[in-house]
Amino acid sequence: MRKQYYFRQSSRGLLAWDVDQLVARTRDFPVLQIPLADIREIREPFSPEFDEPPSWKCIVEHIRLIDTADLCFPIILSSQGWVMDGMHRVIKALLMNRTTIDAVRFTTDPEPDCIDIDPSQLPYDEIVS
């Protein structure tokens, strides 16, 4: 899988967090059971990073990621409850008719790894397992 980032718009510009770093920071956090109904993103438009609606090919790529998502790993939530990592796991859990999902949650969000950077300028070539 290619390198992943979590993005959030802010008054400082686009903020980006390296997902590998989020995983490392939350490794020892307690695992919580979060109701899927509490996850706001499932009621939002699909992938706000797109300037245009996604193509069918893009949707198929996301379906593949959902299919291979491993629910053994908790999703990562920001202090405000936003999904910083794990949206494909959330969708898989919904498809399986689950009502909760394992999650870890920041009480205070870490500083972003990058501020006001174009996502295309970030390194994506690194393959992570």
Image (tube, rainbow, N blue to C red):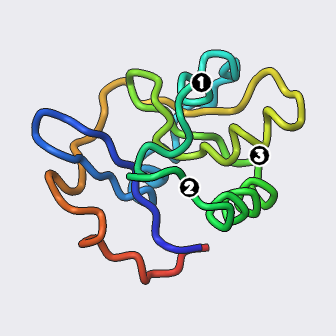
**What residue is drawn where x is 65% and y is 41%?**
74
Q: Which numbered dot is residue 115? A: none
Give the residue furthest to the left: 12
* Mark 3 secondary-structure assignment: loop
Left or right relative to 107: residue 45: right
Query: Where does label 3 land, which residue?
Result: 71
User: Relative to 119, is 45 above or below?
Assistant: above
Give, as a three-letter code, the residue at label 3. Answer: Leu
Q: In the rendered image, which quarter is residue 12 located in?
A: top left
Spatial CA distance of label 3 from label 1 is 21 Å
The amino acid type of the residue labelled 2 equals: Pro
Give the crowd class for mark 1: few <14, some 14-19, many >=20 residues within 10 Å. few
**Image position, residue 78 (x, y; %):** 41, 31
Quadrant position of the C terminus in the picture: bottom right
Label 3 or label 1, whichever lies nearer to me, is: 1
Q: Earlier in the sequence, mark 1 or mark 2?
A: 1
Asked if the residue under mark 1 is in contact with the one under mark 3, i.e. CB atoms within 8 Å, the reply is: no
Residue at image coords 19%, 35%: 10
The image shows residue 31 at horizontal and vertical percentages of 63, 31
Compared to residue 36, the image places residue 57 above or below, namely below
The residue indicated by pointer 2 is 54
Q: Nearer the viewer, mark 2 or mark 3?
A: 2
Q: Quadrant of the N terminus?
A: bottom right
* The residue positioned farthest toward the right in the image shown: 96
